[in-house]
Amino acid sequence: MRTLNARLAPVLGLLLGCVLSLGPGASPRLSTASAQAGTPRAPAPVDAPTQAPADACAGSANFLIGAARSDITGPAAEVGMMGYGQVAQKTEGIHLRLYSRAFVIASPCNGRRVAFVSADLGMVFQAVKQQVVERLRSKLGDTFSDDNVLLSATHTHSGPGGFSHYTFYNLTTFGFVPQNFEAIVSGITDSILRANARLAEGSLRLSSGDLHGASINRSPEAYLRNPESERARYPDNVDNRMTLLRMTAADGRELGLVNWFAVHATSFGNTNTYITGDNKGLAAHTFEVEKGGRTPGGPDTFVAAFANSNEGDVTPNILGGTNGGGANDFEDAALSAKKQYDFAEHLWSTAGMPVMGGVDYRHAYVKMDAVDVAPAFTDGRTHRTCPAAIGLSMLAGAEDGPGFGSEGATCENVHDVWSQFTCAAVTTPCQGEKPIVLEMGTMKPYPWTPEVLPLQVVTVGPLALVAVPFEVTTMAGRRLRDTVRAQLQGTGVTDVVIAGPANDYSGYVATREEYARQDYEGASTHFGPWTLAALQQSFTGLASALREGASVPPGPTPRDLRKVVVGLQPGVVFDDKLLWVDFGAVSEEAKASYARGDTASVTFWGGHPRNDLKLGGTFLRVQRREPDGTWRDVANDGDGVALYHWQREFCVPTLACSKVRITWPIPRDTQPGTYRLVHEGNWKSGWDGRIHPYAGSSRPFTVR
């Protein structure tokens, strides 16, 4: 997440005032069970605390594998986007639909299974994980729980927001957006259920290598604050390692892959208004198409997840700032996607290491604002984490999402009255160098960001996934990997990967040295300078328990705030049009002919896309006429090729009209022939509130 733009402070201030005025009388009170975090929860019934003998899975290469993809695209109009934190950045269309890609891997040798999800989201919030697990339990009983479900985000900054139950993450979306939340939860749940239903015998292979030229460190000065002896261990100030898990059915069918590579999904900048999976989503789509598992309207026979890792200070904009090397955001994303796709294809084709062993996991909730960190993990003294707060430099944003002001504001170098006041506050000794702008952790009646957070370790043979609900910087991720690797020595684990942000979200984690500089990442480390040390201490316990086959206490129960969330954005009242046109009628027609490389465009009279999200469907189709006269789809809004754009039309006598523009940049390898552009939508009646489907098409045109 980038920044709450200070230039929009008056608007946010008004919104904050509204939220603060919502006292207990303005919304339902929290029950004791839901309002109070920190109460012990009963151990999950999934999997007994003990496991099969340590050697039960030694040498076993047998797995049950299932993969599935589901649509999680939220409202494509008038919903604030999640990532850059800018009020003015609202959805106005679709470049590439968002998907949940789920993989269920079960180990017959010890009877355990895990569900891993890579979702095209900015982050996975606590409420999403809670309700996904809840719905899985309602369908499958004790098969899945918090312990063996790992939900990770690709960290795209170009999806609709409003799907957290915590105030801070809903500020720029004017509260909670139930429609988007439901699309995400139902889609993730569906992908896991279908992946689980497809479980069949198969094998796994692991491959890794270094991808250079696809990322740079956006806070190199902060990185240089890490000890020289530590930096000397690594050739670069970013993690170039890509790790790929290849999945094959027993009959030889290629099922899918997951690869982890640390880079922000910020090729699209903070002025973009198209929903898109950004570079990660494009790379995944390309791989699925190449493997034949992705055709317009076709089944998900091959599923490719391009998951994220310790991307906290890593940007795809390799020329600095917001410049990824292309002429615009679309080209930037395509270039970044191609680099990741090409290297993943190389790892796929050379993956020769068979995965042997079993599936295992450990999970616990930790109250991150009250961890007493032992001297072994700090500077030799005991330290305590802090109530969540953000610093002044968060307002400046990062290089690929600039806000207001500049980074590096510490209590030593700021001199304005507000900063001096915050640096003298009682919490400052805990937050160290950070001039506090907002202390979310002490807000009432409940904090504005979560403090009871899930930590999880999952092993699949020699691969260990360290799931963190944070954006972890390059060096912080390296230290955390080393911590877990040391505890898993002797277990056969050879590859340790940071999987995140996962299962929840609460800002960044920088090293203690990086934190002292207070660049964007340090200012966004909510729980203070010793957050990483607290994570290392907690993951030491989880990893050692996994190694020893011991159970771990489940930890405190996170809040369930579903009954008290507030949404301030109205829904669609009705759709209107001019009396003499129909919904789906063409307003601006296509030309009669185009050359390859041209852009075809058609504008329709339409309805509001929030009437029907078209989950599993599409708002547009590019169709080619076949020799028999039928029309065949060659692209839709899940392909990242053609664009669906919505805009409100202020027509007399109402303000409820919509125009929809379908744009198709014609690829240079397009087969010559006759084509048309089709728009499908739904309109809402102002008389009875009923929603009706409609469709329209352009005139046929030739591509020469």
Image: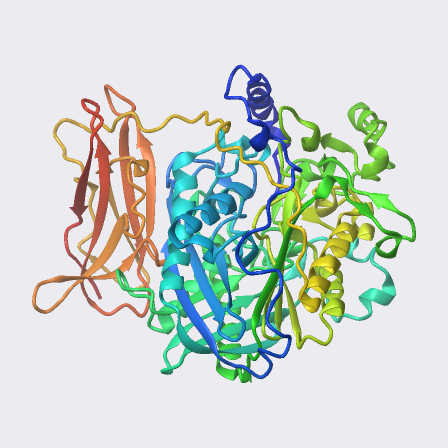
Q: Nearer the viewer, residue 214 or 286?
A: 286
The extreme top residue here reads: 25
Q: Nearer the viewer, residue 52 or 15?
A: 52
Horizontal relation, residue 699 to residue 402: left or right: left
Closer-to-camera residue (46/453):
46
Q: Name the residue located 45 percent from the left edge and 64 percent from the top edge.
A: 103
Identify which residue is drawn at 84% across, 28% down.
Answer: 426
Residue 343 shows in the view: yes
Residue 266, visible in the rendered structure = no
Left-right relation of 435 to 153: right
Say above or below: 306 vs 664.
below
Percent coordinates x, y for residue 63 in the rendering: 47, 75
| Left or right: 420 in relation to 202 | right
- Answer with the quarter of the image where residue 55 lies: bottom right
Q: Is residue 251 above or below residue 397?
A: below
Residue 383 relative to residue 43: left or right: right
**Most distant residue in the left direction:** 628
> Observer-nearest residue: 315 or 115?
115
Q: How many marks?
A: 0
Where residue 244 sits, quadrant-wise, is bottom right
Q: Position of residue 506 (x, y in %)?
A: 64, 43
Position of the N terminus, as image quadrant, is: top right
Q: Quadrant of residue 70?
A: bottom left
The image shows residue 668 at horizontal and vertical percentages of 33, 67
Quarter in which the C terminus is drawn? bottom left
Establish if 411 lies above or below 594: above
